[in-house]
């Protein structure tokens, strides 16, 4: 997925030594109750726990995520771009992490500053199994983000993600919804020359 308006929020920088080191420190601090990161003597700083949860959700580290959740880390913690751990997991295709977060009460349809949901992120990155799981938990299938007006189906069709398109169609995605410029999923499939996706959309529209 690409987004020219919100790159800083939608895509993280490539992993670098400093980034890995900082994340490792955050995770260790949250799990070991480092005194300097406590708000008081009785508990950990929720912000520190939340940042750690975001990191392990992105990495797909289920055991670390489970440990943080058991320590009451907030499952819907948000960063400055309003991303939640569920969004991080969906973007990277970590199905087991998604399951853990949903079981802990994470909001399936939480939105970031571009009105993206976990479903949109999973669909645009062709994580079909995650798309199915999120839909099983009631994710809004026809939700539109506000930067382009794309639905999960439009994103998947534009990028040629046939399996994801098929799942969305089977679950009742609206093939007629246009984006902000009036283009439907079928329009995008044709423009990008994704013949198999185009055929699936035509069949679904009959």
Image (cartoon, rainbow, N blue to C red):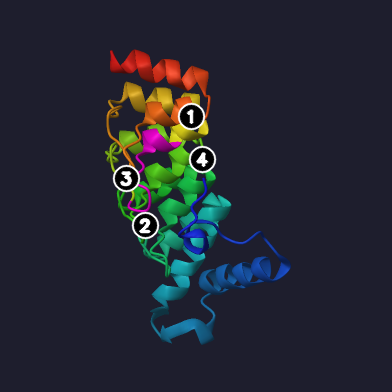
Mark 2 vs 1: CB contact within 8 A: no
Which circle, 2 or 4, is nearer the viewer?
Answer: 2
- The earlier-in-sequence mark between 2 and 3 is 2
Q: Indicate the position of residue 62 as horizontal and vertical percent values.
A: 52, 50
Which residues make up the magenta segment? 146-155
- The label on residue 180 is 3
> CA separation, marks 2 and 3?
14 Å
Mark 2 vs 4: CB contact within 8 A: no
At numbered mark 3, what does the secondary structure look like: helix, strand or loop? loop
Q: Is residue 200 one of those drawn in magenta?
A: no
**Mark 2 Cα within 10 Å, few/some/many (few <14, many 20+)?**
many
Q: Indicate the position of residue 183 as horizontal and vertical percent values.
A: 35, 35
Q: Is residue 132 above or below residue 17?
A: above
- The earlier-in-sequence mark between 4 and 3 is 4
- The label on residue 125 is 4
> CA separation, marks 2 and 1?
24 Å
Q: Which residue is mark 2?
A: 114
């Amino acid at each position: 997925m690409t987004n020219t308006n919100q790159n800083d929020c939608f895509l993280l920088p490539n992993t670098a030594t400093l980034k890995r080191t900082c994340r490792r420190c955050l995770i260790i601090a949250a799990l070991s109750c480092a005194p300097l990161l406590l708000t008081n003597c009785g508990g950990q700083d929720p912000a520190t726990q939340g940042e750690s949860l975001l990191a392990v959700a992105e990495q797909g580290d289920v055991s670390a995520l489970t440990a943080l959740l058991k320590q009451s880390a907030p499952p819907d913690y948000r960063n400055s771009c309003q991303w939640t751990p569920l969004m991080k997991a969906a973007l990277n295709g970590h199905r087991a992490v998604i399951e853990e977060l949903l079981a802990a009460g994470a909001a399936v349809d939480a939105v970031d500053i571009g009105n993206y949901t976990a479903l949109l992120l999973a669909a645009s990155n062709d994580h079909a199994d995650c798309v199915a799981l999120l839909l099983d938990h009631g994710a809004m299938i026809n939700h539109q983000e506000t930067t382009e007006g794309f639905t999960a189906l439009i994103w998947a069709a534009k990028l040629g993600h046939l399996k994801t398109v098929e799942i969305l169609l089977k679950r009742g995605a609206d093939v007629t919804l246009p984006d902000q410029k009036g283009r439907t999923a079928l329009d995008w499939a044709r423009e990008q020359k994704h013949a198999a996706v185009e055929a699936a959309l035509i069949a679904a529209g009959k």
